[in-house]
Image (spheres, rainbow, N blue to C red):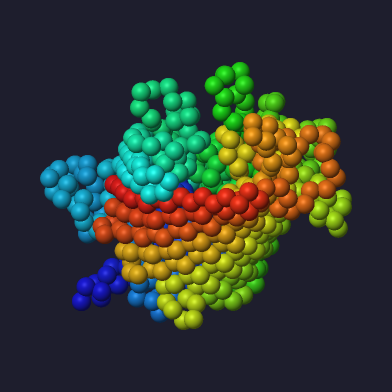
Amino acid sequence: MKKLLISFILLILFSLQTNINAQVENVQISHPVYTFLKEMKVKGIIDYFSEDESVISRFEVRDLLIKISENRDLLSSTEKKILNKYYIEFSDIYWEDNTAFLLDPDKSFSSNLSDILSDKVKYLYGYKSDGANVFLEWLGHFYHGHRFKPGGNNANLFDIGFRVRGTVFDKLGYNLTAIKGGVSGNDLLAEIIEPRLLTNFKWIEAGENIGNYDFTYGYLKYHTSPVENMNLAVQLGREDITLGYGYGSKLVLSGDNPVMDFIKFNFDYGIVHFTSLHASTVGTFSFTRTERYTKYFAFNKLKLVFPNLFDIGIGESIIYSGRALELGYLSPVNFYKFVEMAIQDRDNGNLYFDIQTKFLNNVEFQGTFFLDENILSNLQDFELYTNKTAYQVGAFWYEPFGIADLSLILEYTRIRPFTYTHFDVKNNYSAYGTNLGHRIGPNADEIFTKFAYNLNEKVRLSFEHSFIRRGENEYDDYGNLIRNVGSDIFLSHGEVPESNYAYFLDGIRVNNNLFKFEVRVEPIRDIIFDISYNYCISNNLSKELEDDISFAMLRFTLEY
């Protein structure tokens, strides 16, 4: 009876959706709904969403969930429950039976407080009228990490914050998010369990008596559809984003970087999808203020989407610094490499091609080829120093061997020496001392595998393994560089290289095996526990040394 009632309510919600005003603000990149949409795309239930741009509007998520619902007969019982859960959240229809507001003037505070442990969608406050709305959410996280080897130590992170989001005039979305946190215990372990600390000014500066950090996000996003099937969007502000494809990590913009401030333009019409982004960030942190500087990341991508076949794209990016905003890179209708030549070749230009297939249900293939700077000459000899290239190929198999709710991913990445570097170290492919691109960096390759299984709508299990080979630079016992083999993007290779050739995996050979097992449990909506065990074995083949590290982490997330 309960299942029939839920299905009936959802049918009513679906029938009403055409009268619901669009929520233009984006769904944050960490939301698990993206995982569900990806699995439904590979399964063939939906044919497209802009996953290579990482975040999309709430109304786009809602529309995708509607398409999934139209094929409910093809879903497993767990998938149907996950669909019901997310549609209630993104339908933007607020009934007493599905939504709770802690600060609801029409109900008593004690009555509202009792909904904290319910499965309702929860907000601190919400207001909605024709053409305008606002929602206030309370955010909280607690991390506990315990390192087993080497040595036993602990680290705790705890933060609290808020998110204000909504849409006005049915076209302008907004978001303001602020989080403030503190750290106790071992600092090195804290940075392992929360890598974003390495790009946080308050943490790195360490100017207070307790380790602390903060994250802030905020943007305006305007969206319009001037004609049928045409979408235009302009966004100004800051939020977490990634760019390009990649199951484990991405060659173009991995997301391991700090939050950047940007202006982004999107145009979709028919099979044409175009994105242009211009972002500002900073260089490596220095305690000397005069050594700190701003750098810019400009990006264009044209993608053609062929239904039931494949998506194919070409993209380009430029990194520059040492001057104000460059108007030549601000225009979305331009070819960056030629502009760079016109303004005297000072910057770090990159070009890439990618493809993603969708002609097979349950199986997806994707690949990216990345060219750093020299894009036209000597590509026939990939061992030349100038050929700073990388490629990545992968496959996603959903429901392998007919096992419902199971995902299997296999991906190979290869990055040649000196990729992401530049003759001007300030223009390397980095922000705040972190690589903007793939996490393994240059002169390395990786075989990445992942299994994930939805035990039910509340529990998800996953296992990851990465086998990484690296060729590292050679140093003497005093830390002086002996030989640069192109493994460190924070070393300038200079105008004239030491050698015309750069051999893959040259230098000190190190192999790494990384294992991760994780369980995500959401016993009550918006109350989430992530429990993981991580084990890394590092084998220095050149020096015949082996090290290992293992740690466990518990992360508690509350969004109300």
Say whether residue 287 is visible.
Answer: yes
Q: In which quarter of the image is the N terminus?
A: bottom left
Quadrant hosting residue 78: bottom left
Residue 94: % across, % down: 29, 55
Q: Is residue 528 left or right of residue 67?
A: left
Residue 125 against residue 548 in the figure, above or below? above
Residue 331: % across, % down: 71, 39
Q: Which residue lies furthest to the bottom in this view?
A: 402
Q: Is residue 207 left or right of residue 312?
A: left
| Residue positioned 33% across, 35% down in the render | 184
Residue 288: % across, % down: 57, 19
| Residue positioned 31% across, 54% down in the render | 529
Say whether residue 129 is visible.
Answer: no
Q: How many marks?
A: 0
Nearer to me, 495 or 535:
535
| Residue positioned 44% across, 66% down in the render | 452
Residue 32: % across, % down: 41, 57
| Residue positioned 58% across, 39% down in the render | 434
Quadrant hosting residue 424: top right
Quadrant hosting residue 180: top left
Q: Is residue 481 left or right of residue 374?
A: left
